[in-house]
Image (tube, helix red, strand yellow):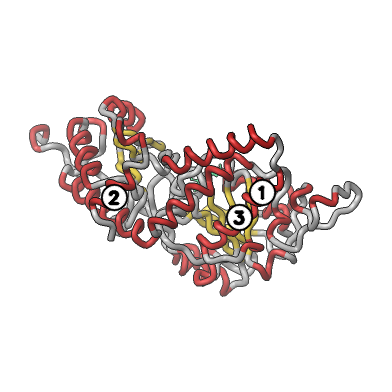
Amino acid sequence: MLSEKEVLAIRGRFPIFRRAIYLNSCSQGALSDSVEKSMLDLLEVWHREGSPWDLWIEQYEIARREFADLIGAEADEIAVLPSVSAGVSSLATALEFSKRETVLMGEFEFPTMGHIWLAQQQRGARIRFLQAEDGRIPAQKYAQNIDRNTLIVPVTGICFSNGFRSEIEEIIEAAHAHGSYVLLDDYQDCGTRQRDVKVLDVDFYAAGNLKYLLGAAGLAFLYIKKSLAQSLQPAVSGWFAQQSPFDFATQRFQPAISARRFESGTPPIPSIYLGLAGVRLLKEIGLAKIAEHVKRLTQELRRGADELGIVLKTPSNSVGPLTVLKCKDAAGLVKHLLQENVICSSRHDGLRISFHVYNTLDDVKTVLSSLEKHLDLVSLETQPTGTMM
Ligand SMILES: Cc1ncc(COP(=O)(O)O)c(C=O)c1O
C-alpha cells in the first residue's frame, strides 16, 4: 500500500493539483513532470539533429517492448498504433465472416467498438448487442448467447459510462468453449492495475495511452496472441506493416510475421515519447500498489455517496477506477464542480469520477462536500426528508 507521504510525493509531480482537484483520468490522464520533460527531450533532439529517425525508430521499438511488458506479452505480439480504433479496424478486416458471422458485444462497449464492427456488416458480419440488466451485463448472459456462429466477442474491461467491470475471465471461458475469439478493450483500466494477457488467455487486447497510462492522444496498442498473428492478414496495410519497411519496396507486399502487420504508416513519434514516459512512471510506482490505492479511494467515495443518498450507476463491488453517480443534470453538475476547481466529466445521466495514483482521500472529501451542495442535481435514493409529504 502506498503511504500518504508517497502519494503526496507522486502528486507533487503533477502540476495541475496546484490549482485543481483532478478526477477525470477516465478522459485524460493528468500531465506529469516526466511526461512534460519527454516532450522537451523530443523537441531538443529534433532541433539538434533535424531528422533523428534512427533514434525515433528505436523509441518506437522500445514502446512496443514496454507495452508488451505491461501486459505480460511478447514484443512481437504488439502493434503500436495511433488509436485503438485503428488497431481494432485493422483486426476486423483480417476476420472472415463466412463460416462464423456473429460479433457479440454488450451495450457497454465504447461507441467506436460498435461502429467498427457495424461497418463489417458490408462484409457479412452480423452484429448482436447484449442489453444490460440493472446496470450489469453478467458473464452468464454472454455465455447464454455465444454459440458456434460467434466469431468474436469484443468486451470492455470497464464501461466508460457507468464504470461496470466486465467478468472477463468467465466471458473468455464461455467464448473459448465455443471456439470464439475475445477482444478485451481495456482502455478504461489499463494503468491502474496489473494485467497478464497470458494468464487471462485473451486472444486480442487493446488499450490507449492517454487516460490511465498518463500519456497523450495519438498512441495505443493492440496485442494479438502469437498463434493468431501470422494466420490473420488485415486488408489494410502500409509500409510499417511490412516485414522490412526500410527496403522501400513499393511493388512487394510482404507483411511482417508479427503483430506489426496490424500497423500501417509512420509511427506517432511525439505521442510515443509522451506515452513511454507515462508508462515508465507507472511501472516505477508499481501497478499493484496503484490498484490498492485506487480501490481505497473508490470505496471511500462510494461510502460517502451512499451516506448522501446518491444513486450510483456503478455496481457496488467496484474496485475502481471509475465511479459514476446518477444525475438529474450531469453536464450542469460538471460545470458547478468546475467552478469549485473539481474536474470531472459526464456521460448521459452520469457524473464520472475517476481516481488514479495521484488522488488522495482529501480529494474524495472535497468532491463529496461539493456534491452535498448540489444534491438538487443528482438522483437520490429517497426524497430528502423535508420534501416528503
Ligand atoms: C473503453 C474505450 N475504448 C476505446 C476508446 C477510444 O479509443 P480510440 O479513440 O483510441 O480509438 C475509448 C476512449 O475513450 C474508451 O474509453
Q: Is residue 297 visible?
A: yes
Q: Where is the C terminus found, in terms of image quarters?
A: top left
- Cβ of disc 1 within 8 Å of ligand 1? no
Distance, label 3 to label 2, CA atoms, is: 28 Å
If you read the primary sequence from the N terminus, does the residue marked by circle 3 or circle 1 appear first?
Answer: 3
Label pair 3/1, CB-CB below 8 angstroms: no
The residue depicted at 68 percent of the width and 67 percent of the height is 228
The residue depicted at 48 percent of the width and 39 percent of the height is 37
The residue depicted at 53 percent of the width and 43 percent of the height is 274
Q: Amino acid at mark 2?
A: Val
If you read the primary sequence from the N terminus, does the residue marked by circle 1 or circle 2 appear first?
Answer: 2
Q: Amino acid at mark 1?
A: Ser
Q: Secondary structure at mark 2?
A: helix
Residue 81 in the figure: left or right of residue 168:
right
Instruction: Read off the residue under disc 1.
Output: 89
Q: Quadrant of residue 288?
A: bottom left
As drawn, the label of residue 62 is 3
Q: Quadrant of residue 367?
A: top left
Above or below, comparing residue 372 to residue 209 in the picture: above
Q: Secondary structure at mark 1?
A: helix
Nearer mark to the viewer, of 1 and 2: 2
Q: Position of residue 1 (x, y in %)?
A: 28, 61
- In the rendered image, the residue lying farthest to the front is 48
Distance, label 1 to label 2, CA atoms, is: 38 Å
- Cβ of disc 2 within 8 Å of ligand 1? no
Q: Amino acid at mark 3?
A: Ile
Judge by depth and name the residue closer to the eye, 321 or 280.
Answer: 280
Instruction: Read off the residue under disc 2.
Output: 7
Residue 274 in the figure: left or right of residue 323:
right
If you read the primary sequence from the N terminus, does the residue marked by circle 3 or circle 2 appear first?
Answer: 2
Q: Secondary structure at mark 3?
A: helix
